[in-house]
Image (cartoon, rainbow, N blue to C red):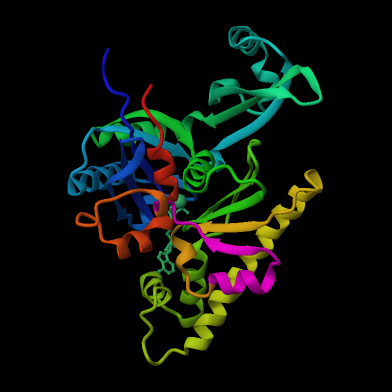
Amino acid sequence: MFAKKDNLLGLDVGSHSVKMLQLKLKDGSFHLAGLGLAPLPREAFSEGRVNQPELVANRIKTLFKNLKLKGKLVAAGVSGYDVMIKKIEVPAMSEKELDNRMQSELGQYIPYRIEEVDVDYQIMDLVKDSPNSMEVLLVAAKKESVSEHVNMVRQSNMSTQVMDVDFFALNNAFETTYGVSDGTVALLDIGSHKAIMNIMIQNLTPYTRALSIGGSQITDAIKDRFKLTFDEAERMKLGYIPNKYSKEELQEIVSSVIRNWISEFKRVIDFYLTNYPHRDIEKIYLSGGSCRIPGLKKVFHEHMDIDVDIFNPLNKINYDSKAFDPAYLDYIGPQMAISLGLALRKAG
Ligand SMILES: Nc1ncnc2c1ncn2[C@@H]1O[C@H](COP(=O)(O)OP(=O)(O)OP(=O)(O)O)[C@@H](O)[C@H]1O
Ligand SMILES: [Mg+2]
């Protein structure tokens, strides 16, 4: 009954690696308790779904043990691909009245069979120009995806206390670092097989999209061009380039994939601008493991008229420099954005 509402262990299960981060609140500010990642073999995932849950659960268990973290209560996040986020407008009413109304009307807002999704909603605000209406944020996540996460966490002898969505986790990480932005900024977290994109418009609900772009596309392009295995190509991408290969040619392969990413990204921005014509994006923040690709910022600068920066959510988190190497935190920080956003959640 008097259990402390401690921060949870943020767990981000990606197709390239499992990432874990824990914070502790001390004197009103966040301190880093621990963080780390464990790479996954490629066969652990297939088409965005966990293919080998026991293997992933084992990696989670080992990582947790190696990091010597405390507490086994987890905040995990489902992927934006498995989630529908929708804003609806209803007459102003109490939370209780909304609960009753939702029980009978939920089906009409959701394009899935109700028994296939877990649904949650939250009252956001009164609608500005019609004070008798309020805005409700509806989130429906595929039950399959939620239970996949919950089961893996259970198999690693931990328990899921909060199930979040990666979009919201990225947002929370950003707001904790930079506060609510005055203007409009775009966050783009580029992983291995997907990217999460949020356009944050002051304190409105963010505009979100999942894009099927990611670092494995670069590895595949290198692999095909130089007739290598995936692992050899991955090493080349990370900068271990045998003498017989041309660095210029490699850079051109990388740039060409990044240009495709930028086209996808621009398409979403154009679509967003048709809905919010006067809210130009002032800055783009990149995160995820693939934001470390050399030359990424440069290609963005060449093809977009918007300022680009790397988002490292650890910049504003206190840590003990005897326990954590600042250079490592600088390197790993952007890849931990979603796990940090999850770690901000509290039980209860
Ligand atoms: N130094 C680097 N240079 C280039 N790419 C890198 C570097 N470090 C990591 N990456 C790439 O980052 C990707 C992994 O990033 P991340 O951990 O964010 O992905 P993930 O969350 O596991 O995947 P996803 O979210 O797509 O399922 C891989 O494609 C990896 O090759
Ligand atoms: Mg990821």
Q: Is residue 62 left or right of residue 275?
A: left
Q: Is residue 334 left or right of residue 195?
A: left
Judge whether residue 306 is colored magenta: yes
Magenta span: 296-314
* Residue 15 is at least partly visible in this image: no
Find residue 223 and report its horizontal and vertical position in percent.
46, 75
Find residue 222 and report its horizontal and vertical position in percent.
48, 76
Q: Nearer the viewer, residue 26 or 193?
A: 26
Residue sticking out furthest to the front:
27
Judge whether residue 119 is colored magenta: no
Q: Nearer the viewer, residue 230 or 14?
A: 14
Instruction: Classify 324 as above or below 124.
Output: below
Residue occupying the point 58% across, 75% down = 255
Find residue 51 and report its horizontal and vertical position in percent.
39, 46
Residue occupying the point 72% across, 57% down = 267
* Residue 217 is at least partly visible in this image: yes
- Residue 281 placement: quadrant: bottom right
- Residue 119 placement: quadrant: top right
The quarter in which the N terminus is drawn is: top left
Residue occupying the point 66% across, 74% down = 302
Instruction: Classify 230 as above or below 113.
Output: below
- Residue 264 placement: quadrant: bottom right
